[in-house]
Amino acid sequence: MAQPFLKKDDDHDDEVDYSPFLGIEKGAVLQEARVFNDPQLDPRRCSQVITKLLYLLNQGETFTKVEATEVFFAVTKLFQSRDLGLRRMVYVIIKELSPSADEVIIVTSSLMKDMTSKTDMYRANAIRVLCQITDGTLLTQIERYLKQAIVDKNPVVASAALVSGIHLLQTNPEIVKRWSNEVQEAVQSRAALVQFHALALLHQIRQNDRLAVNKLVSSLTRGSVRSPLAQCLLIRYTSQVIRESASNTQTGDRPFYDFLEGCLRHKAEMVIFEAARAITELNGVTSRELTPAITVLQLFLSSTKPVLRFAAVRTLNKVAMTHPIAVTNCNIDMESLISDQNRSIATLAITTLLKTGNESSVDRLMKQITTFMSDIADEFKIVVIEAIRSLCLKFPLKHRSLMNFLSNILREEGGFEYKKAIVDSIVILIRDIPEAKESGLLHLCEFIEDCEFTYLSTQILHFLGIEGPKTSDPSKYIRYIYNRVHLENATVRAGAVSTLAKFGAMVDSLKPRIFILLRRCLFDTDDEVRDRATLYLNTLGADGAVEDMKEFLFGSLDIPLVNLERSLKNYEPSEESFDINSVPKEVKIQPLAEKKAPGKKPTGLGGPPPGPPSTIDAYEKLLSSIPEFANFGKLFKSSAPVELTEAETEYAVNVVKHIFDGHVVFQYNCTNTIPEQLLENVTVIVDASEAEEFAEVASKPLRSLPYDSPGQTFVAFEKPEGVPAVGKFSNMLRFIVKEVDPSTGEAEDDGVEDEYQLEELEVVAADYMLKVGVSNFRNAWESMGPDCERVDEYDLGPRENLAEAVNAVINLLGMQPCEGTEVVPSNSRSHTCLLSGVYIGNVKVLVRLQFGIDGPKDVAMKLAVRSEDEAVSDAIHEIVASG
Amino acid sequence: MILAVLFANSEGNILVERFNGVPAEERLHWRSFLVKLGADNLKGVKNEELLVASHRSVYIVYTVLGDVSVYVVGKDEYDELALAEVIFVITSAVKDVCGKLPTERLFLDKYGRICLTLDEIIWKETVTFCVIANEHPFAFSSMDTAANVLPHPFS
């Protein structure tokens, strides 16, 4: 063993620094491992060497294949020793070395012998090792012993077998499922440990059989489960049964609630807590059901154990989101937790209080939080900021004190994420609470005077440019903005120049003075700043229409930046100037749902490379390379692939719908999954009798479709120009099939013609809509104006919940949800969803959907559409009316 | 499941670690995160007093045992309470092996037995059950089962 050089007189002082592994080296330890081969084994020495090997492995050292194999073979020699301690170390190191399949065979007979040994520890450990390193075939040989072990009277052995069963269930489920009877017997074991493991395994065996789980829970909830851990599992399984049966019981008491409630009086804390949490998480839990659970959680709040306090406050925090009133009783206990030494607990307490507090308690709470904020880490502060933001939106009258609080903490030290959270909160409050706007903007102005984060400065400057000119006295912001031009880096300076220009465009009285300031920027050292100043001076000074200038300054860039970047990179300098309208607007398209055989080149036309960034371009390139489709004009949209076959069928086919102004092209991506077949002359015969406005104009067959090498065939239709025609198409795959000799890979000369029925395909209204988002919906909505607005109300009939109704309408229209409004909070009775898109003919469309749900789940919807063309607004209404 | 069990010395060097289901590239992040968590909060904490934290959807229960700090990380069914049980088993086992609160030297002296014990997780006398290893249900890494009432290998 490596020994440090110690002086005799100070060895006591150095005791702490002494490490038995000082200077340990892998090579030396591997040399030492030769003692395993000694004819006279020294168990103590061998154990020490194994310890060193374990230490090395734990320190992240790795053994090469050769080293691991050598050590493994040496270790197997140690089975000759009868020393109990050494044998157990051998078990550990075998698992650590995880021998390969061909090496395992060396130890299996020794381990199988140990499995039936009279020594309990041999039996238990050998079972665990064997089950870890074994494969299916060996398992069937030892299955009989494992079954015996499950009902072994020694709990260690029984548990070892049960836990091994849990692991083996992942790899050899059929075998483990045969042990059901023994496991069931073990559930009744007197040893708590065995009962716990047996219950876990039994549930896993039966988890896909709802009736069996129901039976298991019914019988065990009546009897007595001794192990607290098993009781916890039982509570979890019970909650699962309650959840699954909830939809069947319309009225009356909830099944098993009494069991959960009874568990609240259990003597083990973990069981009490588990039951309390299960009750709080019940679907549609009533306040009568909640009360006993909240009461025990309240007791935990004043526990001396931090873990229990944390668990309780975390659960109450969750309850407060849905049932804030139920938690108010705990507010006093919760307030005392604000000073808890554990900051996680304190943060949870604060955020819970912020959710449950009423308007009158806000000020008092804010005082407490102020002292608390200074001594917690940024990550906790962010959680508090988010809670304060929701509180302010809940009580808008309190915006003054909450905004003050936010601005105060904005001045204090903090990292980027924290500052960003505060700025985001202030911006949201300004948007949603008009009274908070002016004070909020001033706070932001003060912040950028001393802001070290370029990103935040530019974001705030941009926001100031939009909101500042609309305030009562826009001139007061100019000083803050212009200071940035003097004091900041180039990025912020450029941002400030743009903001100044926006003020100049919106506020006529300020325009002359803005001109002076912009002219000064012409001498900036940075190109971008100078360019922007020149551009804005020319734009603002030009006599052109005011609307054009505003559109230029305030209009959102309705093109995804990645697409713009890619188009610019592809643009080759020439006589023809770059046309921004040529940039694709689609946000994203699913990658092609096709498999590529590794190492094989794509056949024929060369499938477009998968992956969202390149898909649109790839489709466009692919289509324009086919002469038949070359004159169809610009591709408007390509849909995500629609599967036309079930998974795992002989031939996998999906279709991509390419929409042009006067044409539609179906691209059928076909994959042949049968190795013994080669398909040739593959076409899709399309019956368009249910699509009256479409007429087939071209078809491009696929010459050859070998096994697992996808290829495409195309069918093109003509349709009335610019009209969003819809229809249903039935498809039949037709091809010549040739047998392939799997050994040589050669196909026979003669083939047989065959057909394969595919599923139907529909062209729907959503296919004519591009998902194009807007960065600020309200601005976009207001700038679009009410001229082409169409509003109507619809009854959507009974629905499961609001979320389902919202999703259905979004899918029907195929538009891009904005500002996260596609997410419907659970249990909400009304919801507003904002959508944007570009309709065929490049017409921008904005949609505002307001949903409401009444008692018997009837959903009503108000649909407001604004677009650049009233015919398009009407068309959107027609889509909804006929959908 | 239990994602990690980690022992570190007072300077934040790892003594024993077991990861389960944590990709290799994320382990470094976890190591430094846990060690920093300990450095920030474990000063002056009494032996075996449990501290708790949550990081995203993951729970961490940790404590100090003599010169050694112990961290247990879990998610899903391994919430703070289940982890408290796990860490209790682990600290009891380590104390059993060392005979007293471990110094770093004592811990390293008994390294082999600690590894063995963690593999088998030892229980004695009053204890009736124990928390076990590998993925499921209350378990971690390659240390699996179970209660052991037999004497220690080196005693």
Image: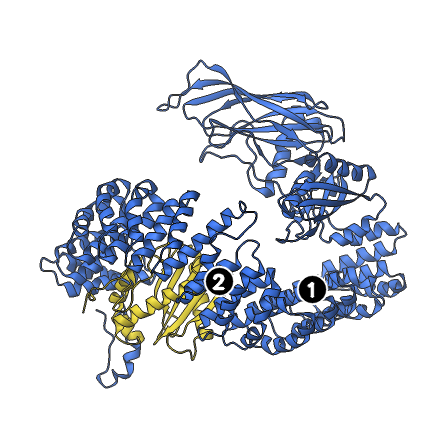
Q: Crowdedness of circle 2 by 10 Å Cα count: few (<14), some, many (20+)?
A: many
Callout 2: chain: A
- At 26% across and 83% down in the image, what residue appears? A12
Quarter assignment of residue B77? bottom left
Q: Return the residue at label 2.
A: A276
Q: Spatial distance from mark 2 to mark 1, Cα to Cα?
A: 28 Å
Which amino acid type is marked by label 2?
Ala
Image coordinates of residue A69 in percent, x first then y, are 24, 51
Image coordinates of residue A303 in percent, x first then y, are 46, 74
Callout 1: chain: A
Q: Colour of chain A?
A: blue
- At 56% across and 67% down in the image, what residue appears? A379
Depth order, front residue of A309/A101:
A309
Quarter assignment of residue A48? bottom left
Image coordinates of residue A833 in percent, x first then y, are 70, 49
Q: Return the residue at label 1.
A: A394
Figure quadrant of the C terminus of chain A: top right
